[in-house]
Amino acid sequence: MLVGLLALAVVVAIVAVAGFLLIHPGTPDIRVSEAGSEYRFESPGFAFHSTPGEYYLVVDLLARNVGSGPGSLAFSDFRLNATGGPYDRAVLQPTAYMTLAPGGQASVTVAFAVNATDGGYRLEYGGQAVSVPAPPPPPPEFDMHVDNVTANSEDNNGFRASPGYAFQWVNLTFANLWHGGLEMNVFYFLLEDAAGARYPAHTVIGPGTIAPGASARVTVIWETPASAVPFRISFDQVLGPWGTVTVS
């Protein structure tokens, strides 16, 4: 009889402990450490493209749960401090939310859109701060070379420039290093003169699209004051590649 009561007491105690553990599974303690970083023009998964003057800072992390209970990682848990100000809109890969069991670990990637001139990065998560060195710029998505510039009184259709103005004919060679097509849209080109004034393109002559891996010559015409000295050309394919080239 006594043995039976002791056995019953042990069973009840085990059930009670198990129930307690189910209700109170323990405290998670997730530690993160940097495993590498790089700048990219696109966010992980190619979901978003950076805008002119910005990169995506992509940081590879090792996340380890050294606590006694399951814990979670979410994109909203991360914050990046930098010289250009804090950033709190993170992209987390492979998923935006994940759970780590006690003793578990996972390799994750977190990315932030940052100013290309930023530095002093400190990644914050759950009271932890991880220093992230500023990586080198990403490889270019295209090469844009100025072949020559000629000032003319007429555009490609024979229309004369306004009094005191001239048409700047700029011959460019494009090499597409991106995974998508480069669209030679007249609205994607901008000319800046030596005084800092900017001019939208008047006409683009050449292929409508340059395929990945292909090269092509393109002529872009701008109407500027006759005294303007072309200095820099910008190309910005909205939601796509962007870059500049100096007119020598």
Image: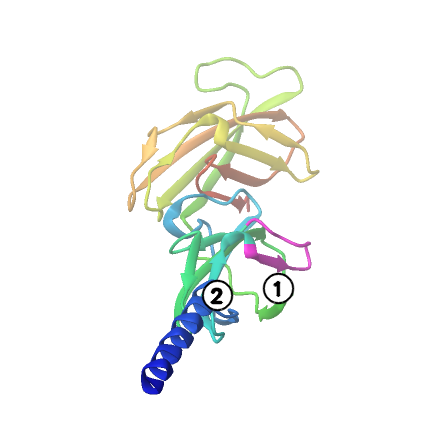
Q: Position of residue 197 (x, y in %)?
A: 68, 33
Tell me which amino acid carries mark 1: Tyr
Instruction: Please give the label number shown on residue 186.
Output: none
Residue 56 seen in the current view: no
- Quick one: quadrant of the N terminus? bottom left
Q: 213 left or right of 243?
A: left
Q: Position of residue 67 (x, y in %)?
A: 49, 74
Q: Earlier in the sequence, mark 1 or mark 2?
A: 2
Give the labeled residue for mark 1.
121
- For the residue pair 165 and 86, the one nearer the viewer reads as 86
Residue stretch rendered in magenta on the structure: 77-89
**Residue farthest bottom in this picture:** 3
Residue sitting at x 46%, y 50%: 41
Residue sitting at x 49%, y 37%: 236
Distance from disc 1 to disc 2, alpha carbons, whole Å, reads 11 Å
Residue sitting at x 35%, y 45%: 176
Q: 179 left or right of 26?
A: left
Q: Position of residue 229 (x, y in %)?
A: 63, 36
- Characterize the local packing of mark 2: few (<14), some (14-19) or many (20 or more) Cα atoms within 10 angstroms: some
- Overall secondary structure of the magenta section: loop
Give the labeled residue for mark 2.
37
Indicate whether residue 84 is drawn in magenta. Answer: yes
